[in-house]
Every structure is written in structure tokens, then in C-alpha cells.
Amino acid sequence: MNKIAVLLIPMLLSACATPTVVDTRKAGDQTLSCEQLHQEILDAERYEKEARKERTVTGTNVAAAILFWPALIGTYSNTEEAINAAKERKENLLKIATSKGCKI
């Protein structure tokens, strides 16, 4: 039984979602062109969408909930951090775009 636990726990821990947590502000943001700002905003939206997708009911999440619930908590914590970072990045970029008069 202990051998099974030793093998199973690392697998479940590695099953936690690890979506990309973007930097909310980057050193060169102020120098981006309107087109570059638009692309960065699209990227932030994509990262947010990917993080939200990690929260959906998947076989891995169901297995984690049944067999090792801390893994599910880790998944939700990781996705929450990624979603918030992407939203903050987008807001920052929109402020810069607005101040430059970009049509986004």
C-alpha cells in the first residue's frame, strides 16, 4: 500500500494546473505601438481564457478531488493567480492604449 501511495501522490501533485502567470507590467510597455499594444491585449485575453479552461471539470480534476483533494485546491489557486494577472495586464495595457489615443 505504501508503494502505491508513493507513486500516486507525486502523480496527483504534478496534475495540478500550472497556467501561465503573466507579468502585469513590463518595462517596455510604455514604448509599445498601438498595434503592439493590441497584440499584447489579445495575448492577455488568451492567457486568461486558458487559465479559466483549467478550472473546468476534467478527468484529472475529478481524480484529484476524489483521490487527493489538495491537488484540486492547488489547481484553483494556480488558476486564480493566472486569471487575476492576465486581467490586470489587460487593464494596464488598455490604460496605456487610451493615453496614446489607440483605437482598440
Image (cartoon, rainbow, N blue to C red):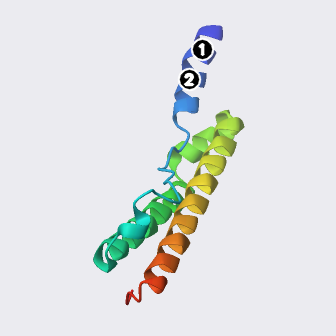
Asked if residue 8 is positioned above or below residue 48 in the image, the reply reads: above
User: Residue drawn at (38%, 87%), measured in percent from left and top?
Assistant: 102
Q: In the figure, is residue 46 to the left or right of 74?
A: left
> What residue type is disc 2 on?
Pro
Residue 92 shows in the view: yes
Please tell me how crowded label 2 is: few (under 14), some (14-19), or many (20+) other residues with Cα within 10 Å: few
Residue 89 in the image: state x and y as whole percent.
Answer: 52, 65
Instruction: Report the front residue among 26 and 75.
Output: 26
Q: Say which quarter of the image contains residue 8.
A: top right
Residue under pointer 2:
10
User: Residue drawn at (41%, 89%), measured in percent from left and top?
Assistant: 101
Quadrant of the frame with the N terminus: top right
Residue 1 shows in the view: no
Asked if residue 103 is positioned above or below residue 40 in the image, the reply reads: below
Q: Say which quarter of the image contains residue 67.
A: top right
Please tell me how crowded label 1 is: few (under 14), some (14-19), or many (20+) other residues with Cα within 10 Å: few
Residue 84 in the image: state x and y as whole percent.
Answer: 61, 61
Q: Secondary structure at mark 1?
A: helix
The alpha-carbon separation of the residues under discs 2 and 1 comes to 7 Å
Residue 46 in the image: state x and y as whole percent.
Answer: 41, 65
Residue under pointer 1:
6
Instruction: Report the front residue among 101 and 21.
Output: 101
Q: Say which quarter of the image contains residue 27.
A: bottom left
Give the mark count.
2
User: Residue drawn at (61%, 46%), measured in percent from left and top?
Assistant: 75
Asked if disc 2 and disc 1 are in contact, CB closer than 8 Å, the reply is: yes
> What residue type is disc 1 on?
Val
Residue 31 in the image: state x and y as whole percent.
Answer: 37, 68
